[in-house]
Amino acid sequence: MSNTPAEPGAARPLSGPQRAMRKLGLLRDIDLALHLPLRYEDETRIEAIAALREGDTAQVEGVVRSSEVEGRSRRQLVVKLNDGSGELVLRFLNFYPAQQKTLARGQRLRVRGEVRGGFLGREMVHPAFKAVEPGAPLPAALTPVYPASAQLPQAYLRKAIGSALVRAPLEEILPPAVLPPGLPALKEAVRLLHQPPPSTPPAVLEDRSHPAWQRLKFEELLAQQLAQAQAVAQRAKLRAPALSGCVGGDDRPLHGRLLSALPFGLTGAQQRVCAEIDADLARPVPMHRLLQGDVGSGKTVVAALSAARAIDAGWQCALMAPTEILAEQHFHKLVQWLQPLGVTVAWLSGSRKGKKRAAMIEKIASGEAALVVGTHAVIQDDVVFARLGLAIVDEQHRFGVAQRLQLRHKLTEQAALEAHLLTMSATPIPRTLAMTYYADLDVSTIDELPPGRTPVVTKVFADQKRAQVIERIRDEVARGRQVYWVCPLVEESEHLDLQNATATHAELGAALPGCSVGLLHGRMAAAEKAAVMAQFHGAQIAVLVATTVIEVGVDVPNASLMVIEHAERFGLAQLHQLRGRVGRGAVASVCVLLYTPPLSDTGKARLKAMADTTDGFEIARRDLDIRGPGEFMGARQSGDELLRFADLNGDSGLLEHARRVAPRLLAERPEAARAHVARWLGGRSEFLKA
């Protein structure tokens, strides 16, 4: 394949634009060909200055009648352009000598910009302009405006893309039977989107309903579905330990003893997902299952029972969580359940160092530690497992792609085997998202809360009612209940007018004399955080002022009130997670969302969703609508949008078609399927496996 300007000879250093193109992933001719415009500018028409209206974006051509620098302290370049029908002022607040030369008196210019009203009549501020000869031809197509960066001028990118379009392999790979009816050829679609004729209705280009856009969206969705199907097929060829039965023929396996020892019964949903996981673990193929369930639905006990299956079969289990607080919550719960049954549980985190860490690593390497719980410290190079058969990742979307791939590659030291992988998430995945980004996963859903859980009432107040909220805290504490108060920052920001955790801690301490008010934030040492959490668990602290370090995993049934300050600054999924810290006991609980007006449209939508429902699946659906899939998924793509053009909601018909035809194409035309994935995803298909 020909090199583009982004791939110069090895001996020549890259220029600024070339580096910027490389950063955008524009390495091949096909990458440039598929780098489609964000919008278009119509430079195919010249309008008379006399016919211009305020608010219009237009292109005019005329001769400069005057060009003067005005003002002393705040200099401006003011240019008057005349086309015979009228005069237009061009105003430049920032300018360079080279621009002054082009804008000199007598020059013929072609100018494009937004028309405004000014003291001297109609004007354009900082319009695009270029010097032209009389009678210079107009472009035959709309001018594309591409996604770019400060180091990558549009003119450079347009030239590179124009050159790449000549060389890019845009031949048809897909058989006609695979395509939805009525769509144009790929080459025709790509060229039209880069150079649409002026007769193309702007609306169908902007809303991406044009058949050319439909072809590109389908191609993209099909590539993504094929990559997922390939990942499933590749995994089916791998071998894993069959985790069934009990080593040594023990007639009282750990799994059964754990079930008997639990102080509660499993819900029907928990029993169902346990059966699904058990069936996977018993097969000699690596499990790749996502366990999703709303906040408080009981995912941890399912993880413990899955770990017991692995331990019964003579293998180790590792559980990795994104934060030390969450990992420690899991550790204490699992120790409470499993240690009395004779299971050694190891703890690994970034704060555990020296001899204690070395002792844990030795227990893991020898196999003495049957269960290992920790943060990303679990996947560090010096951690070697004797027989790792099952890895469990909690809140998997909060780990970066590289970390999740590293965990998958580390799953076992047995050369011929891979361990089973169970990922967990309290952020339920909407169906359209599961059909695309998670199509290679088997999904188990806990759609039932344990009995005795009371729904949390959510109230939304402006910050002016802060005093009433503090009064409510006083009442809750007087009843022997505990309270969370969550703040978004640890210290004052020069840019955001937000109350910080330290100031709020002092404020509540003064407002609630005789009440124990604790403080917890991410910058505290691990030992300090652990001590504060232990005091809150033991009810020695009545009110805990915290940052979002308590977002997941914290379980204090006596906490009945959650106050989230500057709630408009939090994401919807994060608000739902925080709300899930209360309502964990039998007492009626309330979540108060304090906001600072005025609210943005997004802020209003988030707070309304929180007030409307406590259903995590409905929250997730609205979150997807508000934020879109890339942001909703967090770091899954590590900055690479795997769907650049298709919209999961608007293009559901194309998605269904792609899902239908992908298995057939892979089975009947595997070479075409591989070529299609390579064209669209290049090396990024690896992210789909994370």
Image: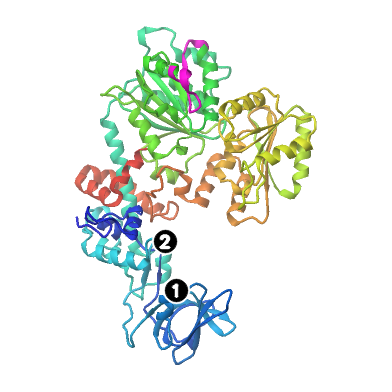
Q: Residues within 10 Å of mark 1 (few under 14, many from 20)?
A: few
**Residue at image mark 2:** 150
Query: Does residue 672 appear left or right of residue 106 in this picture?
Result: left
Q: Name the image quarter holding the N terminus.
A: bottom left
If you read the primary sequence from the N terminus, does the residue marked by circle 1 or circle 2 appear first?
A: 1
Magenta residues, as a range? 340-358
Q: Is residue 47 above or below residue 176?
A: below
Instruction: Determine whether the residue tagged by mark 2 lies in a helix, strand or loop.
Output: loop
The amino acid pointed to by label 1 is: Tyr
Residue in the image at 62% along x and 27% along y: 533
Q: Determine the residue located farthest toward the bottom in the rendered image.
A: 84
Instruction: Determine whether the residue tagged by mark 1 lies in a helix, strand or loop.
Output: loop
**Residue at image mark 1:** 96
Residue 359: numbered disc: none
Let me know if residue 420 appears in the view. Answer: yes
Q: Percent from the top left, x then y, of residue 641? A: 39, 50
Which is closer to the viewer, label 1 or label 2?
1
User: Closest to the observer: 49 or 562?
Assistant: 49
User: Closest to the observer: 605 or 106?
Assistant: 106
Residue 615 quadrant: top right
Q: Percent from the top left, x then y, of residue 499? A: 67, 45
Q: Percent from the top left, x then y, of residue 427? A: 51, 39
Residue in the image at 38% along x and 38% along y: 402
The alpha-carbon separation of the residues under discs 1 and 2 comes to: 18 Å
The amino acid pointed to by label 2 is: Ala
Let me know if residue 276 appears in the view. Answer: no
Residue in the image at 35% along x and 57% along y: 20
Residue 510 quadrant: top right
Marks 1 and 2 in Cβ contact (< 8 Å): no
